[in-house]
Image (tube, helix red, strand yellow):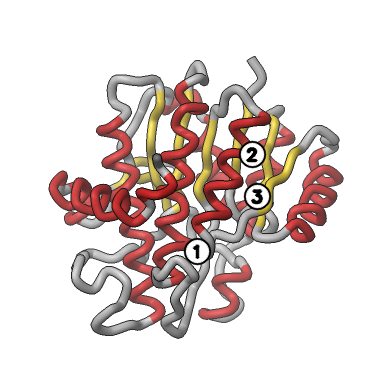
Amino acid sequence: MSKYVLITGSTDGIGKQSAIDLAKKGYYVLVHGRSDESVRQALEEIGSASGRDDLDGFSSNFESLRQVYEMAQNIKQQYDHLDILINNAGIFQKEREMTGDGYEKTFQVNYLAHYLLTRLLLGLLEKSESARVVNVSSMVHATAIDFDNLQGEQDFMGSKAYGISKLCNVLFSYKLARETEASHITSNCLHPGVISTKLLKQHYGDIGSAVEEGTENVVYVATSEDIEGVSGKYFVNQMPQSSATVSYEPHVQDKLWDVSEQMVARYLK
């Protein structure tokens, strides 16, 4: 069976390098970007770097849950299974902005869109002989979560919103691991490292390691036989590490899942 991997936010940075690395390893890569043009350009670059001409691409702006839904439907129409889903797309917002769906942009793009996409693609993942969901989080994920200020309703700071969205990635990973415990789907999350990406440069300056270093952990969690069947872990430098204490609390995981489900309910029917 051919191995298919979908990587969100794979038109630049860690996502694009991960696409190149996985294509070189023989995986059939589905590239995602926010626009047709960015996807077209990335397909050319990834194809040239990997020597592959059998890549596929899908565009969806995660600021629109409708577009997330439509992309998932397109993928389900074209593919009969999915082996790896790498939820990587992310943004950093200095100011509080709302999407057309009425949600804070950082929260929606970094977390809620991925929650919806994963839920919509679970059927394809279930058809894989061994499927993996990989959520790219960060070592700066928050250590607490206030559901009354989940989207900066009471106070907003860009770094705080980013950290909360990355904590949501971890909470979702652990909850999904519990939900899929009886299946052959695993769910893990990771910190890729402090990597010199466009997002990092925009907000922290020219710091961080090469993008290639960041993809090592992503590719490891997505493909390594060493962790076959391992689920519900947070990886740093290809090793399971401890995430924030609050992330291990089942009732917090459950509450975030329920809140998220209500937010995207119209697309899950």
Element marked by disc 2: helix
Q: Quadrant of the C terminus?
A: top left
Q: CA distance from mark 3 to mark 2?
A: 12 Å
Q: Amino acid at mark 3?
A: His
Residue contact between numbered discs 3 and 2, judged by CB atoms under 8 Å? no
Q: Position of residue 123 (x, y in %)?
A: 46, 27
Q: Amino acid at mark 1?
A: Val
Q: Earlier in the sequence, mark 1 or mark 3?
A: 3
Report whether 141 appears left or right of 42. left
Question: Label for residue 87?
Answer: none
Q: Which residue is mark 2?
A: 74
Question: Label for residue 32?
Answer: 3
In this view, the residue in front, 252 or 166, is: 252
Q: Which residue is mark 1?
A: 194
Q: Residues within 10 Å of mark 3 (few under 14, many from 20)?
A: many
Q: Quadrant of the N terminus?
A: top right
Report whether 126 appears left or right of 33. left
